[in-house]
Image (tube, rainbow, N blue to C red):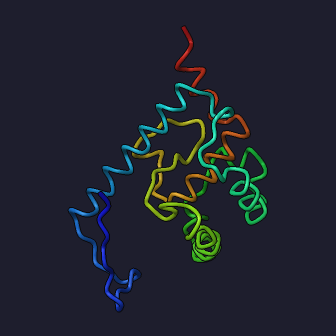
Amino acid sequence: MSSQVTVPADFDPENAQNIEDLEKQFAVKAVLHAQTFWNLLEKKKGSEMKLTKMDDQLLEDFIKTFPKYADPKELSNISEDEMKSPEGKKQWREFMNRYEKTLNDYNFGTLLRKSASDEYAEETTIFVPRVQFLVFEIARNRNKLNDWIYEEAHKQ
């Protein structure tokens, strides 16, 4: 059963106050999502995985919009400061809004590993909208940057 939330017409998300219980619920959901993704990567090589029906389209648009991420070295280590700079926010907002009607929960908060060589931990992750998580992890998977997780889990 889905519950709809009605947002007041005068609601301004840029100046909204934080509600602690709501933030905790979002954090729990983000952690569960991260654990699920990690468990999938332990069971199947990322390079053999599809995250959405739109993987090809998302990846193509991502690389076209952010050409530096065609380089696997750039995918390996993500700069949070660059992403969240005023220019970065503007460019990402424009990118994400293209998926508002086609990608469920496109802007839902999700955890993304800053480095493809790290596990999820408080100091190695950043909180990003779902579409950012998807494009980075789709690109990492295609470049085999996540395959080490499967290999590590299946060493024996």
Q: In what quadrant of the picture does the N terminus appear? A: bottom left
Q: At x 66% / y 53%, what residue is drawn?
A: 54
Q: In what quadrant of the picture does the C terminus appear? A: top right
- How far from the left and from the top, in percent, is residue 109? 43, 59
Q: Residue furthest front?
A: 1
Please state if 29 lies on the left or on the right of 40 as rendered: left
Q: At x 39% / y 80%, what residue is drawn?
A: 13
Please state if 71 lies on the left or on the right of 44 as rendered: right
Q: Nearer the viewer, residue 29 or 146?
A: 29
Q: Nearer the viewer, residue 139 or 49?
A: 49
Total numbered circles = 0
Question: Can you tell which quarter of the image residue 18 is in?
Answer: bottom left
Question: Can you tell which quarter of the image residue 24 is in?
Answer: bottom left
Q: Residue furthest top?
A: 156
Question: Can you tell which quarter of the image residue 26 is in?
Answer: bottom left
- How far from the left and from the top, in percent, is residue 57? 72, 57
- How far from the left and from the top, in percent, is residue 123? 43, 46
Q: Residue furthest bottom?
A: 10
Q: Residue furthest left?
A: 21
Please state if 147 lies on the left or on the right of 123 as rendered: right
Q: At x 45% / y 39%, what residue is drawn?
A: 120
Q: At x 46% / y 31%, what residue is drawn?
A: 39
- How far from the left and from the top, in percent, is residue 108? 44, 61
The vertical placement of 8 against 123, above or below, is: below
